[in-house]
Image (cartoon, helix red, strand yellow):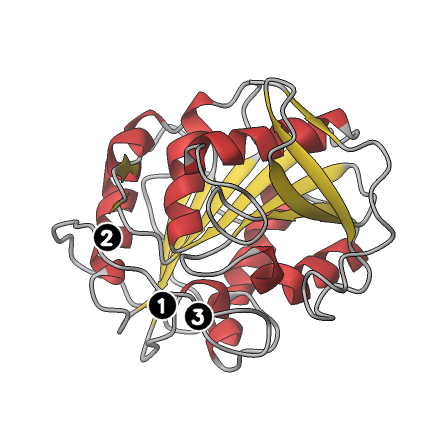
């Protein structure tokens, strides 16, 4: 389990490397290539389509397609996996869509979670016009409306930036936030400023050789108040990015970070 002393980073058995703080910047963030996918109140569709297999080219055979959005809108497209009482929002990377998270979503649903993957505005089947942070907040509201009693946010790269930016403003608070390779700033969304008000457990994970993003992870960690549990994991000798740190198809990258993700979920958002 995670230590409750939030001011101390505990070293993982896999020789996690701690980095010095560095400056943050906005970068062009691409989707992680590979087998898992492509490189307020909310309401959802009450009767989702049987599956999302066609939309994800077979990557989500067990997911239920839904639509949802803020203030009663239905302008975001997502897929729900599982029926658990703990919700999990999975936010994708730039130049990707909901399908990118399908493998991890199915795995998490089998573990007992109710998982929502979705297309950010302007990606996949969701039209542009809504902020990424607002989309995350709408995803949380949708899961709560479907019966989730607690919700955890997991975001990769652009998605990590979005969940960090959204979390401080979501009420009631989410159970926790996991940020994988998040930039401090992306397309004007300043996660570095937002995390100064973050009051929920948070895990920052990144690869040591993921240039720029490793420095941002350290800076985001440093900016996060120590009043709640926080942790920074930097995987040594690793240059992978975002979803690759969680997707079961990626090894050894996922093997370096997934133990920390599993431990965090068990401590703060158990299924």
| Residue to which mark 3 is pinned | 32
Front in this rendered view, residue 237 or 38: 38
Q: Write the residue at 43% across / 65% down.
A: 12
- The answer to which of marks 1 and 2 sits earlier in the sequence is 1
In the figure, 99 relative to 130: above or below?
below
| Residue to which mark 1 is pinned | 16
Q: Position of residue 259 (x, y in %)?
A: 55, 64
Front in this rendered view, residue 31 or 177: 31
Label at residue 151: none
Q: Write the residue at 64% across / 43% down.
A: 77
In the figure, 62 relative to 129: above or below?
below
Which residue extends farthest left? 23
Q: Could one spot residue 214 in this view of the protein? A: yes
| Residue to which mark 2 is pinned | 216
Q: Write the residue at 56% across / 48% down.
A: 119
Distance CA(mark 2)–CA(mark 3): 18 Å
Mark in front: 1 vs 2: 2
Mark 2 lies on a secondary structure that is helix
Q: Check the picture and name the quadrant holding the C terminus.
A: top right
Q: Is residue 34 left or right of residue 63?
A: left
């Amino acid at each position: 389990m995670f230590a409750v002393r939030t001011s101390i980073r505990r070293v993982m058995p896999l020789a996690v490397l701690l980095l010095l703080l560095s400056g943050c910047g906005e970068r062009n963030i691409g989707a992680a290539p590979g087998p898992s996918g492509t490189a307020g109140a909310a309401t959802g569709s009450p009767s989702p389509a049987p599956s999302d297999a066609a939309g994800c080219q077979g990557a989500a055979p067990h997911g239920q397609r839904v639509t949802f959005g803020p203030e009663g809108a239905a302008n975001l497209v997502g897929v729900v996996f599982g029926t658990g009482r703990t919700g999990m929002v999975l936010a994708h990377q730039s130049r990707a869509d909901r399908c990118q998270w399908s493998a991890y979503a199915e795995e998490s649903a089998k573990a007992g979670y109710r998982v929502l993957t979705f297309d950010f505005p302007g990606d996949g089947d969701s039209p542009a016009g809504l902020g990424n942070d607002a989309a995350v907040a709408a995803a949380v509201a949708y899961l709560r409306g479907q019966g989730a009693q607690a919700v955890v946010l997991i975001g990769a790269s652009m998605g990590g930036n979005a969940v960090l930016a959204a979390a401080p403003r979501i009420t009631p608070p989410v159970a926790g936030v996991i940020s994988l390779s998040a930039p401090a700033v992306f397309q004007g969304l300043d996660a570095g400023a937002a995390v100064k008000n973050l009051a929920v457990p948070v895990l920052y994970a990144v690869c040591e050789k993921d240039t720029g993003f490793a420095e941002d992870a350290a800076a985001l960690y440093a900016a996060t108040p120590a009043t709640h549990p926080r942790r920074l994991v930097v995987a040594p000798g690793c240059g992978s990015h975002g979803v690759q740190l969680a997707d079961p198809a990626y090894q050894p990258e996922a093997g370096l970070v997934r133990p920390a993700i599993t431990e965090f979920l068990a401590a703060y958002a158990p299924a």
